[in-house]
Structures are given as structure tokens and as C-alpha cells.
Amino acid sequence: MATVELKSIRKTYTSEEIIKGVDLSIESKEFVVFVGPSGCGKSTLLRMIAGLEDISSGDLLIDGRRVNDLAPAERGLAMVFQSYALYPHMNVYQNMEFGLKLAKTPEAERREKIMAVARTLQLENYLKHKPGQLSGGQRQRVAIGRAIVRNPKVFLFDEPLSNLDASLRGQMRVELATLHRRLGATTIYVTHDQIEAMTMADKIVVLQKGIVEQVGSPLELYDCPRNLFVAKFIGSPPMNFLPGTVIAASEEQARVRLASGQEIVVVAGGAQGLIGAAVTLGVRPEHVRLGHAVENRGSGQVELVEYLGSAAHLHVRMQDGALLVIQTEGGVRVHADDAVTFSFPAERCHLFNSEGVALHRRSSGRMAA
Ligand SMILES: Nc1ncnc2c1ncn2[C@@H]1O[C@H](COP(=O)(O)OP(=O)(O)OP(=O)(O)O)[C@@H](O)[C@H]1O
């Protein structure tokens, strides 16, 4: 399997710079997900790796070898698109065979490879079907099968599940993750869906406007987002953000007064220089504790309860008008218009300066700034 390295990669279309200097190392067998909002440059970056777009400047290395000038077919990659791009007049077998024929693979070997992959992807009963006779999930499996039979060094996926309905997407997510574990192929996967990123990735690359905002494991990004952008993007339902002012700070903690007057102690280092400064307090819905507490407490009125079965989301209006989402277990007996009290665990709160940069959290032992 292969390593992929991006060194100061840039892309300019006419006069606009779309990719603004990306450095990234992808290890052999790693499952890396590029995630970010529409237009941030995920697909452009993937297409540059694939060789479908020129690289304006920088170096792309596969297994240590510079491949900027190699044609797509010479890079040892296989790409699976959102649109499947299957040949409609060919049946499943022929679709999977096409690339092997082009590569002049002998017929017996072609057959052996296709049958093995069809078994893996549970397509054995559909080999004679044309794409038009298959469901979306089956078509996507054929597109994946067509990539696997060529035994590529690196798999590239561009939003492969976005045309599928929610339940099929969930199922295919598990299938892809299982397949990756079995094949152990280096994989780069583009999505705008943070749940796909969180559930499948070894490493997530968060992009915004052609810049890498943060690279890390799903848990690193969840626990220690470097800035407001990553904090907003990772996690569902998203993190709550409340404006406040630092009123006291030690090396390891900061005391923040919210607009409501409520004072919250946050485990965050380096806030001594920020006394009097405006900051943003972040707390995830699943970390807010419902019920009375001595410290870090607040209160408000429930506006809406969303019951999800195992969990419920309470939308709570605080005294200063801010809206707070609290995730609780599904069995909780809270209704709209109820008054509730809650608390923010100090070690679960995040603090961002006026530029949106996170103050590091010493308790977790990881730097976030
Ligand atoms: N051929 C092109 N010529 C000029 N601009 C382009 C071209 N292709 C893409 N762009 C621009 O580059 C930017 C990044 O596009 P890209 O498709 O990489 O974004 P993305 O993050 O994959 O978005 P999405 O999730 O919507 O697919 C966009 O602003 C887009 O308009």
C-alpha cells in the first residue's frame, strides 16, 4: 500500500487561488477524510491527487515519488464518484471488467478477480444486470467493485454516498469502513457530511476556503477543535456558543461572565492576558447537565423538545435571550414551557478568543491553539 504526501499544493483558476498551500502526509493504509462546506476546495484537491486537474504549484508524492506530471492511469489510483459513472449499456460484470481489459489482464484472471470482488460486495446475483436495473446502493457497490478489481494503491472517493437515502447511506458507511479494514488500502474520501467523517476516518482534514483548518483524529477534533470554524463543523447537534467576557484567569482556568450575568469557570490555559476581553464560550449539547448544581449553573425556559428515542434535544431560552441546546437521555420528563436549571462542566467547556482561536486545554494534555 502507499503513502501520499502533499507539499505546499496550490491551485489557481484564471486569477483566483482555490487551494492556498496545502501540506499533508497520508500514511499507508490510512482512511483520510477531507471535509468542509461547499466550495472549500475538497473535490479540487482530490482531483489534483487523481491527476484530473493540474497542480499549479507544490509537489505531490505517492510512495515518495513525485507524480505531478504523471497521467491519472500511471498513478496507481482508483476513483469512485458520487455519480457512479457506470456504463449504462454494459452489465455489472462488464462494467467491472472494462478497466481490466484496458490493462490487458488475461481473461481467466479477470474472471477470478471480478468473482472475488462480487462476492465481497454481494453482487454475485446481479452480474448480468444493467445499471438501470439496480438500486442506488447496488450501483454504488458496482462503482466500488470496479475500483477494487484494479487493485489500486490508493482509493479516492468523491462524495460516494450523497445520492443515497439516509438509511442506505448509514448501511454503506458501515460496508465501506469494513471493506477498508479488510483491504487495508490507503483511502482519501471527500464529503461535506461531518457524520461520515467522524464515523469512518482515521484522520480528518477540515478545509475552509482552500486552507487546512485542522488535521486530526475524529476524537481530537471533537475534544480539541483549534478554532470556532472546526468547533462549529464537528459534532451533531452542533456546539453551543455563548458570548462572554473574561473576568479572572489562572494558568489553567478562566472565569467568564456571560451576557446573562452568569459566571462560568472554564478549564483553559493562557487566558491571563485576556482579562476584560470578549470571548466565546463553547459547550456541546451532550455535555450540558440538566439539574441543580453549585457551580457553573444557569437556568432558562424550554421552548421545544425534540424526542429522538434514545435521546432528546431541549431548546432552552436563557435569561439573556440566548438559545441553548441540551441533549439528554430520551426518558427525561421535560416539556415545552418548563423552567429548567442546568450546569456546564468546567472541563467540558471550550473558550475562543475574539479571533475565534481556541485557548488550549491543559486538562486533556493536548494543545488546541
Ligand atoms: N474548472 C474550474 N474553473 C474555475 N473555478 C473552479 C473550477 N472548478 C472549481 N472551481 C471553483 O473552486 C472552488 C472549489 O470547488 P470544489 O468543487 O473543489 O469545492 P468542494 O469543496 O468540493 O465543494 P462541493 O462540496 O460543493 O462539491 C469553488 O469556488 C469552485 O467554484
Image (cartoon, rainbow, N blue to C red):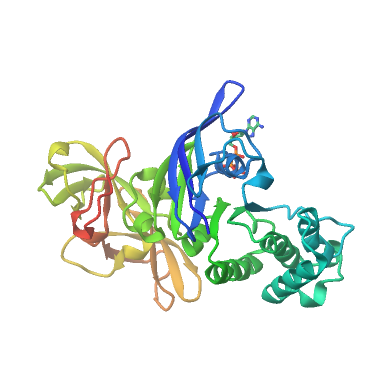
Asked whether, in this view, residue 192 is left or right of residue 332, the answer is: right
Residue 351 appears at what percent x and percent y?
26, 48
Residue 174 appears at what percent x and percent y?
57, 70
Asked whether, in this view, residue 31 is left or right of residue 166, the answer is: left
Kindly give the residue lying farthest to the top in the view shown: 15
Location of the C terminus by quadrant is top left
Residue for point 46% across, 59% down: 236
For residue 229, above or below residue 198: above
Residue for point 47% across, 59% down: 30
Viewer-nearest residue: 177 or 159? 177
Asked whether, in this view, residue 303 is left or right of residue 242, the answer is: right
For residue 14, above or below residue 361: above
* Circle count: 0
Q: Can residue 141 be seen in this view?
A: yes
Residue 102 appears at what percent x and percent y?
79, 53
Viewer-nearest residue: 310 or 353? 353
Residue for point 48% across, 52% down: 3
Asked whether, in this view, residue 161 is left or right of residue 19, the answer is: right
For residue 66, above or below residue 342: above
Q: Quadrant of ligand 1?
A: top right
Residue for point 25% across, 50% down: 367
Viewer-nearest residue: 126 or 323? 126
